[in-house]
Amino acid sequence: MLKRVDSYFRSASVQSLQDEIFPPEQRRPEGWFGYFITLLAAGGFLLTLYWAFTFTWTPIATRATHLAIMIPLTFLVYPAFTRGKPAPYPSIVDICWAAVAFLAFAYTVYSEDRFNMRIPYYTPLEPLDIVAGIACVAVIFEATRRTIGMSIVIINFAFIFYALAGPIFPGVLKHRGVSALDMVESIYVFTSGMFNFITGLMVTFVFIFLSFGVFLAVSRGDKVFTDFALSIAGHRRGGPAKVAVISSGLMGSISGSSIANVVTTGSLTIPLMKRIGFRPHEAGAIETVASVGGILTPPIMGATIFILAEFTGVPIRDVLLYSILPAILYFASLYFYIDTKAAKRNLAGLPKSELPKLKKVLADGGHLFVPLIILIWMLLVGYSPFYAGAICICLIVPISYIRRHTRMTPERLLVALEGSSRVMISLTALGVSAAIIYSVIVATGLIVKLSTIILALSGGSLLAALCLVALSSYILGMGLPVSAAYVLLAATAAPSLEQLGVSLFAAHMIILWLSQDSTITPPVCMTAFVAARVAKAPPMKTGWHSVLMAKALYILPFAFAFGELLDGTVDQILFDFLALLVFFLLMPAVFEGWWFRPLGWIERGILALLGAGFIYTVPGPWQEKWIALAGLLLVTGLAAGYLHRGRTDSTAPAPVATN
C-alpha cells in the first residue's frame, strides 16, 4: 500500500512540480516522515481556509494555533545550519525544538481564557506561564534564525535589552526600565505582544494571498502569464526585457515576493535578454527592478500592504486603488529605460515565429485570469481580503479543469496544499519577530523618542526628514527583510513625517516604497544577487545597475510627500501623474545620451533641465501648474521633433554581441 501511494504522489512529474513550488532550502523527507510533514502542512492551510469562511475563533486562539502548526513545521523542514547539503531527515534536536514549540503554543491556546480574565501587571503569573512565555520567544527566535538569518534576532535582543536597561541610556532615550517578569507578561500574555495585529495579518491575509499565488503557479498560471507577455511584447525592440517587465508585474502582483519572482520569470527572461544583446548584469538588473515593481503592484503587493492598511486604518480597497498610478509610473520608467537602451544599441526583438500566438495563449490559458479578475472585483466592492482570497483559491481548482494541461489533479492539488504552508513558514517566524519588536517599541515609548530625534536632526525640514528616513531604510534593509524594515520605520518615522505636514497614509506609503530599496541597493541586495546568479553576472555590478534603473523607487516617495499623487483631487492626481510620466520619459535619454540619435552634452543638458522642470511643477503652486505643464510639454515636443529630424541611418549602431 505504501509503495502504491508513494508512486502516485512521488512521481517524477510531482517531484518536478515540488522543485518549482517548494523553497529549495527546505528538506523533503520521504516515507512516513514525509507523509507526516505533508499532512501537517496541508492541514495548516485547510484550517486557515476554514477560518476564512467561519472565523468564530478568538484572535489569540487563532494565532497561537497557527504558530503551534507552523513553527514545529519550520524545525522539521529547515536545517539548523546551512553548511553543505542538509540531512534528508530532521535530527533529534530538530524534533525536540518542534515538540517544545507545539507544547508552548498549545498551552497558550489552553490558557487563553485565564489570560483574558487577569488584571495586567497585578494578577501574578503562574510558573508555567513564565516557562511557556520564555519557550515561545525562544522557539520564535530560533525559527527566525533558521529561515531569515541572525540579523533580526540580534535586533530583537537589542530592543529587549533596551527595555530592560532603560535607566542606563542617556538623554531622550532614557526610561524607567521594564522588569524581566513584566517583559514576559507584555510580550507573551498581552494581545499587544507577540500575538498582536502583525501576527494576525500573517496568519490570515498574508497566508491566504501567498496560497493564492501558489495555487495559480501549480495550475501553470505563471507560464500563461509569461506566454501572454511574450506574445504581446516579445517581438518588439528589446522584446525580452519588455517581457520581463510585463510578466514580472503580473507574477509579482500575485506572488508577493520579489526573489520568487526573479526565480520564476527570470529563469526564462534573463537568458532571452542575453541572447538578443543585453549584457548579463543588465539582464539581471532589469529582472530585479521589474520583480521589485511587482511587489508594488495591486492586487496583492506582498505582506507589507496589509500591515500598512492596519497601521493607517485605510481600507485595503483604497490602498490598492491609490497604488495603481504609482505602479504604472514605476513600470513606465523601467520600460522607457529599456526602450532607450535597446534603440541606442539596435537590439531587436525575438522572431515572431518563435513566440506564442496571443489567441492561442488566451484560448489555452486565458481561463486562469478569471480568479484574478474575480479577486480584484471582490476587493473593489468591499469584501474582506481574507474571504475574497479564500473564495478565489477555491475557484482556481474547478476553473483549472477547463483545459487538460492546467488541471489540478489530486497529486497536484496536494502539492499546492503542502506548498502553501511551506512558502508561508518562511514568513511566519519573521512576522512574529516583527510583532515582538513593535510591542517593545510601544511599551518603552520609543516611538515618541525616535520621532523627536528625527525632527531635531531634520531641523523641521521635510526634505531632510525624508532623506533621514531613506538612509534609515537603506541601513535597516541591509539586515532585515522588507516587511520587518517597514514595521520598524512605520512605528518610529511615520509620526515625525506627520508632524511635518505629510498625511498619515502618504507617510506610510513613503516608508513602504523606501523599504523596498534594500532588496536592490548594494552592498546587501538579495533580489539583485539572486538575479545575478541566474544571469551569471557580477552581483555588485548587477546591484548598482539596478539602482540606476529603479529611479522611480527613490523619486516617487518624495513626490508622495511634496505632491498630490496620493492626497489630491482627481485633476491634481492626474496632473502629477502626467508630469512624472514625462519626467521618466526624459531621464533615460539624459543618462544614456540617446533620443532618436546620439545626443551631445548640450542636448542632454537641455533635456535634463526640462525633466527638472516637470519635477518642479509637482509641488508648485496649483494656479500655475497647468500653464507650466503646457509650456514644458510644448518645448519637449519641439525638442523631440528636432532630435527626430536629425536622425540618420548612419547613427544606428550595430547590435551588441551577447558575450
Image: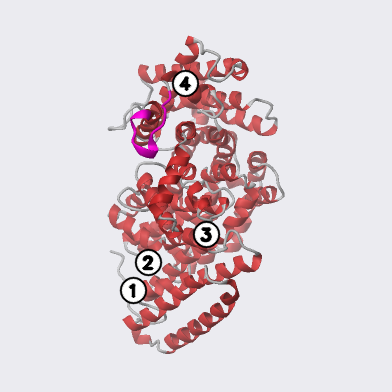
Mark 4 or 2, which is nearer the eye? 4
Tags 4 and 1 touching, CB below 8 Å: no
Q: Establish if 306 lies above or below 605.
A: above
Q: Which residues are magenta?
A: 167-178
Q: Residues within 10 Å of mark 3 (few under 14, many from 20)?
A: many
Earlier-in-chain disc, 4 versus 2? 4
Tags 2 and 1 touching, CB below 8 Å: yes
Q: x, y (%) of residue 371?
A: 65, 48
Task: Tell me the amino acid under the disc marked 4.
Answer: Asp
Tags 3 and 2 touching, CB below 8 Å: no
State the SS at label 4: helix
Q: Is residue 208 left or right of residue 521?
A: right
Disc on res. 655: 1
Report how far apart the C-alphas of labels 4 and 3 lie in the structure. Answer: 40 Å
Report how far apart the C-alphas of labels 4 and 1 lie in the structure. Answer: 68 Å
Earlier-in-chain disc, 2 versus 1? 2
Earlier-in-chain disc, 4 versus 1? 4
